[in-house]
Structure formats: C-alpha cells, structure tokens
Amino acid sequence: MRTSSSRRGRRAASAAVAAVMTGTALLTGCGGDGGGAEGDGRITLRVGTFGSFGYDDKTGAKLYAEYEKTHPRIRIEESNVADGQKYWDTLKLRLSRDSGLADIQAVEVGFIAEATGPSMADKWVDLSKEGGADIGAFLDWKVKQATTPDGRVIGLGTDIGPMAVCYDKDLFAKAGLPTDRDEVGRLWAGDWAKFLETGRTYQKKAPAGTAFHDSASGLFNAVVSSDPVQYADASGKLDWENSPGVKKAWDTAVAAARGGLTARLRQFDEKGTWNAAFKNSRFATVACPSWMTGIIKDQAGAANQGKWDIAAPPVAGNWGGAFLAVPKSGKHTEEAAELAAWLTAPAQHAKVFAVNGNIPSSKDTLTSPAVQDAKLPYFGDTPVGRIFSGAAARITPATISRYDGQVKTFLTDNGILDIEQRGTDPAKAWENVKKLIDDKIDQ
C-alpha cells in the first residue's frame, strides 16, 4: 500500500462528535454506496483506499484500466482518503450500519486485528473461498494477520512495509555528511541513538531553513516498528505501557523533538504542509518504509528527481502494509472478490512495485528478478529492490492487538506532536496519552 499514518482528531473531548461528523463528511471518501449496474449492463465496482496503493491509472500501475480491458462488463472507481485514521473511523461507522461501503475496502495492518475481531469478523467475505485467490502465495504471517479465530481469511495482502531511511543527497553534502548510501548506512548501523547523533552532526552545518528529520512522530513509528514487542504482549493483549518497543520509540522521538532535529511536521496533515516540505527540501531524512518512495516521488516532484537516495535503517523493521477486504453487504461481492484477488496476485504485486515501490506480500514475487533487480526511475541507480527485499527478509513480525492503530495515533498526535510543536513536558504528554487511552479504549 503505502500506508498513510493513522490519524485521529486532536481533541479527545470532542471525539464522539468528531466520529459522527467524519462519517458524514467523508461519505465519498470511502467509496459511496457500493457498485451498481448501469443501463448498458456494465457493473461499477468501487474501491475505497487511503494513502498510495499504486493501482490507479494516473500515477500508479494502471491496473484498473488493464482489468477493465479484459473484463468489459466491469468499470472501476477508486475513492482515496489521505488520512488513514479518518478513513478507518468512517469505515467502522459504515460497517456498523451496513451502508455506504465500497465494494472493496482497504484495511491498514494497524486495524486488521480489529477487523478480524468479534464485532467485525462477520462483516466480510471469506476470501479463502470466494474470488479465486491463491492464499498460499502470500507470506504466512501476512495471511495469519487477516485470519479470524474460526479460520476465515477476510483480507488479501497488498504490500508490507520493510524500512530504510531515505535521504536528500544535496542536503547531506552541504552539511558535510557522506552521500554514498553504504557510507550513510554505516553512520547509524545497529542503533537509533547513532541516528540521532548523525542528526546532531547535520544540524551543526545544516543549510538554512532545513532540519535533519521530518517528524518526531514519523521517527516514533519507525523505531517502534523495528522492535518485536510493540503495543501488545505475546497473547495479543494490549500492553503498551510496559512495552520496551514503545519506550524506546518514545524516548528516541522525544530526544529528536527536544533536540531540534526535526522540521516539526505532522505527516499526512490535511493542509499539505508535510507534502510541500518535500518539494521545498525542508528536511534531509525521512523514515522510509517501501511505500514512502511513492510519496517522495509524487510530493518532491520532478525538480528533485535524482536528489533522494535510500540507505539501510539503524534496525530492520516493518512499518505498514495493508489488505483488500470485501464487505458482505455489497451488491456485487462475487465480482469484487475476483477483482481483489487479481489486484493482489503476484503479477500485479510486481507491477505496482515497479511503479510505486510498494514491496509485495507474496513470497515468490519478493524473491523474483522483477523485484530483486528493480530500480525506480525517480531514485536513479539506487538498487531499490535489493534494499527493500533484503530488509523484508529480516522482519520479525510483532504480535498485534485490535487497538494498535488507535494507541499509535494517541501516542503520536496527542503525545509526541504536542512535545514537538507546543513544547509540552514529556512526562505530562505521557500522562495525557495514558488518560486518553484509558478513557477511549475499553478492553
């Protein structure tokens, strides 16, 4: 996919009202009332996504046009929302009403445990029985994430998010840092503390108006994603307060924010400030799961082509990834399941990667020459396929809970962001997050 970071409204006091307003305001954002039959007998299938999945006919792999060509009865419309949290809030509201759903809905990995949980599991088509998908083609742990307790597979994997660090070579050179990707990777190899130290070195000679890193919240997500223990314990129960991964990520992000190493940006903000900062070269690094390469290409633009490169991260991890699911209440579930199976088949995974950089979640595609030898034109001769497939091989999947997405949003938007942009004391910010989670999440 390309995940957009999960986001929630800033003020918890109005959360209940905001949820209803979001469900109303974003009615077109999640795909409308599902597909319908047209006067000429054609069927319109609506696909609801967030972030950048790389399927579209404008900047993606043109998969919709390809499918329509071989399936003349089918017409495909995609509705896309940049903000993953708002997308999910709206989707949950619609599922509860069995109304307003797209024929295919994307589900981010941070919410897949909730989608397979007791309140939602029966809302989805079992894609191990409908649509003809080869379930065995996917990574085993990816299938497990989308499998209900009674064995139904409610989502087909689109991508995974093996991490690297993307960096602006021009800014590194101006700050006196090396620009060769192997040398850059060695600066912080094995330790996020070394990443911060590199940031301090950068800031000493930083070009005016630039920062070492884009966002402390983005850094938090990267660090926690590199730890095998994140928001849940081994049984899948939420245990974020005692998580070594959360503590390490919090401490690292706080150090970056208070040390002036970030551009104090909110990733995927609605005003587009973060997007514009790519184009204006306001920061030198961004934590870079594979799907981020598509965002850099689109937002940094043609003027910055060739300036960005990709280095190994301090610690391997997986940030993001998604699934395609088919709501049972749709008018054309059979056709939707077939389209979902086709979009997530190995051949299409390879096409999306070649254009958008989204690393496939299918086993054979990951090891295929099409991925291993791949380069993305925007990044020049960077061996993108080798870098990200190598990172994928080192992923240790973390146990996830049904609340991971919500907890992550509270920690970043109501914790880290307040420290970074408002100077809130870290201890107070932590207590604010704890209160929000205690109030809003009923286990």
Image (cartoon, helix red, strand yellow):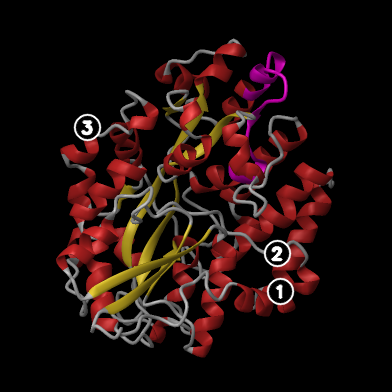
Report the residue marked by disc 1: 18
Image x and y of residue 252, in percent: 65, 38
SS state under label 2:
loop
Quarter of the image where the C terminus is located: bottom right
Image x and y of residue 131, in percent: 20, 75
Q: Nearer the viewer, residue 78 or 404?
A: 78
Q: Amino acid at mark 2?
A: Gly
Relative placement, left or right, of 83 versus 255 is left
In the picture, the disc for residue 308 is none
> Looking at the image, is mark 2 or mark 1 earlier in the sequence?
2
Quarter of the image where the N terminus is located: bottom left
Report the residue marked by disc 3: 373
Q: Nearer the viewer, residue 165 or 75?
A: 75
Image x and y of residue 420, in percent: 76, 42
Relative placement, left or right, of 359 versus 67 is right
* 101 part of magenta stretch: no
SS state under label 1:
helix
Q: Amino acid at mark 3?
A: Asp
The single residue placed furthest to the top in the displayed view is 176
> Looking at the image, is mark 3 or mark 1 earlier in the sequence?
1
Residue 258, placed above or below residue 284:
below
Q: Nearer the viewer, residue 52 or 56?
A: 56
Q: Amino acid at mark 1?
A: Ala
Image x and y of residue 411, in percent: 67, 55
Which residue is depicted at the point 59% across and 42% down?
275
* 214 part of magenta stretch: yes
> What crowding class fits label 1: few (fewer than 14 Cα within 10 Å), some (14-19), or many (20 or more)?
some
Q: Which residues are magenta?
A: 199-218
Which residue is depicted at the point 83% across and 46% down?
422
Q: Is residue 202 visible?
A: yes
SS state under label 3:
loop
